[in-house]
């Protein structure tokens, strides 16, 4: 399924190719997030125009709304949302542990109340795999226990034990035709837990491995450390996926640490507040200084929004609440994320990744506010 094409001599970065029944995916790859069966504010044609290779869907949300009957009736998630390329589905574990209102952890899953109407629901390895089979995703994720970053070592240990047991149960469930299944490594910031979890999952021989329990509100050094503690125990011949990460600069640094796949709600979420990602960091187009600024969102950008529209116009749209404003920023931000990945792949191919990484990090000034947005919303539980 995964072909390792090249490894960077100056870091752990890898150039690879992931094969699914709906096409191949060049890695490192960014996967736009389509939680509710839609990448917020973008249509499939726009996603294809910006060279999206694979998108994300979410088991928890789609299970609650519109429900499996509707998606079965539509002929699966791809047909329901008119997206022919690969889809990866999250197992719902993260949402159950962060969004659901009341819960009781049982041996075979979690009893919880819907965050929408309070109805009592149950999701475990069997249920999650069955939902993902019906959705028909190309890559399914195992149902895991994702503890918050404030969890005690004892709680993290219990989460790892549960994650490993549930992974085995997921492994034994029926899959959709051609569906790959990835294991998820938990273990917080504890090296010994990360190691034991990774080793137990590798033993089960999954099609790929995700590093979970990151992007749960932890500070950046802790996030990087969690990846560094996990990576050495993952086989080089399988894809590695850092769940829910990150900013463009974080993705560059995580590629250098051996990660192949990323997903993040940031590009579309902050776009809805008028925040644009650029190679120098983020800025708010709503700012008064852009009132008569007739340059594109980011000079040199080849996205549809930058090719046709100015900051002044987009600022105006945002100020008068025209939907087009947030759509244009969403287009630019998503395009930027995808293009950074394209550049990374090109530089890995040419053997110039180290120079690219150095230059990218030197130019990019991280905005604390953006980082905080990600942590807070994900810990509290957000709509995505
Ligand atoms: Zn642009």
Image (cartoon, rainbow, N blue to C red):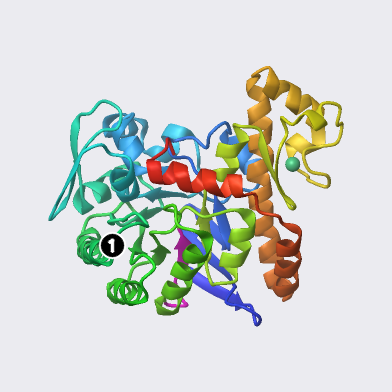
Q: Is residue 226 magenta?
A: no
If the picture is divided into quarters, which one holds ligand 1? top right
Q: Position of residue 293 (x, y in %)?
A: 85, 31
Q: Position of residue 12 (x, y in %)?
A: 57, 77
Judge from the rendering whether residue 42 lies leftward or rightward of residue 148; answer left or right.
right
Residue behind label 1 places its C-beta within 8 angstroms of ligand 1: no
Q: Quadrant of the C terminus?
A: top left
- Residue 309 appears in view: no
Q: Does the magenta stretch include residue 239?
A: yes
Q: Nearer the viewer, residue 299 or 367?
A: 367
Q: Give the range drawn in magenta.
A: 235-242
- The residue lying at 69 percent from left, 21 percent from top is 319
Q: Where is residue 253 in the image (x, y as percent from the top left)?
A: 60, 66
**Mark 1 crowdedness (10 Å alpha carbons): few <14, some 14-19, many ≥20:** few
Judge from the rendering whether residue 263 lies leftward or rightward of residue 106; answer left or right.
right
Q: Nearer the viewer, residue 110 or 201?
A: 110
Judge from the rendering whether residue 120 lies leftward or rightward of residue 88; answer left or right.
left
Q: Position of residue 303 (x, y in %)?
A: 74, 41
- Compared with 46, 215 (above or below) is below
Q: Which of 150 and 79 is in front in this view?
A: 150
Judge from the rendering whether residue 288 lies leftward or rightward of residue 271; answer left or right.
right
- Compared with 79, 91 (above or below) is below
- Compared with 99, 198 (above or below) is below
- Residue 80 appears in view: yes
Asked which quadrant contains residue 322, the reply is: top right
The residue carrying mark 1 is 152
Asked which quadrant contains residue 196, the reply is: bottom left
Task: Look at the numbered disc 1 and give the secondary structure of its residue.
Answer: loop
Asked which quadrant contains residue 271, the reply is: top right
């Amino acid at each position: 399924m995964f072909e390792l094409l090249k490894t960077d001599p100056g870091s752990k970065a890898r150039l690879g190719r992931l094969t699914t029944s709906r096409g191949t995916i060049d890695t490192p790859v960014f996967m736009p997030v389509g939680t509710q069966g839609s990448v917020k504010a973008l249509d499939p044609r726009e996603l294809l125009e910006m060279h999206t290779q694979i998108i994300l869907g979410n088991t928890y949300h789609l299970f609650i709304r519109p429900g499996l009957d509707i998606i079965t009736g539509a002929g699966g998630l791809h047909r329901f949302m008119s997206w022919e390329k690969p889809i990866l589905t999250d197992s719902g574990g993260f949402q159950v542990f962060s969004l659901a209102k009341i819960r009781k952890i049982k041996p075979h899953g979690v009893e919880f109340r819907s965050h929408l109407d309070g109805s009592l629901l149950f999701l475990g390895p069997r249920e999650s795999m069955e939902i993902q089979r019906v959705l028909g995703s190309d890559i399914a994720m195992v149902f895991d226990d994702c503890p918050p970053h404030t969890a005690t070592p004892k709680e993290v240990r219990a989460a790892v034990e549960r994650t490993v047991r549930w992974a085995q149960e997921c492994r034994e469930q029926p899959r959709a035709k051609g569906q790959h299944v990835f294991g998820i490594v938990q273990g917080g910031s504890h090296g010994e837990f990360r190691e034991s979890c990774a080793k137990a999952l590798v033993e089960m021989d999954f099609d790929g491995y995700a590093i979970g329990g990151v992007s749960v509100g932890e500070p950046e050094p802790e996030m990087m450390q969690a990846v560094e503690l996990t990576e050495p125990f993952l086989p080089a011949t399988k894809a590695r996926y850092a769940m829910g990460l990150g900013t463009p600069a974080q993705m560059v640094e995580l590629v250098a640490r051996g990660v192949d796949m990323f997903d993040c709600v940031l590009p579309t979420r902050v776009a809805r507040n008028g925040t644009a990602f650029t190679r120098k960091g983020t800025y708010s187009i709503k700012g008064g200084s852009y009132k008569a600024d007739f340059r594109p969102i980011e000079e040199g950008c080849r996205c549809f929004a930058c090719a046709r529209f100015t900051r002044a116009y987009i600022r105006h749209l945002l100020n008068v609440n025209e939907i087009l404003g947030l759509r244009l920023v969403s287009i630019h931000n998503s395009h930027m994320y995808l293009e950074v990945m394209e550049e990374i792949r090109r530089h890995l191919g040419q053997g110039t990744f180290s120079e690219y990484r150095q230059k990218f990090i030197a130019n990019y000034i991280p905005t604390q506010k953006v980082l905080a947005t990600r942590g807070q919303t994900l810990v509290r539980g957000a709509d995505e």
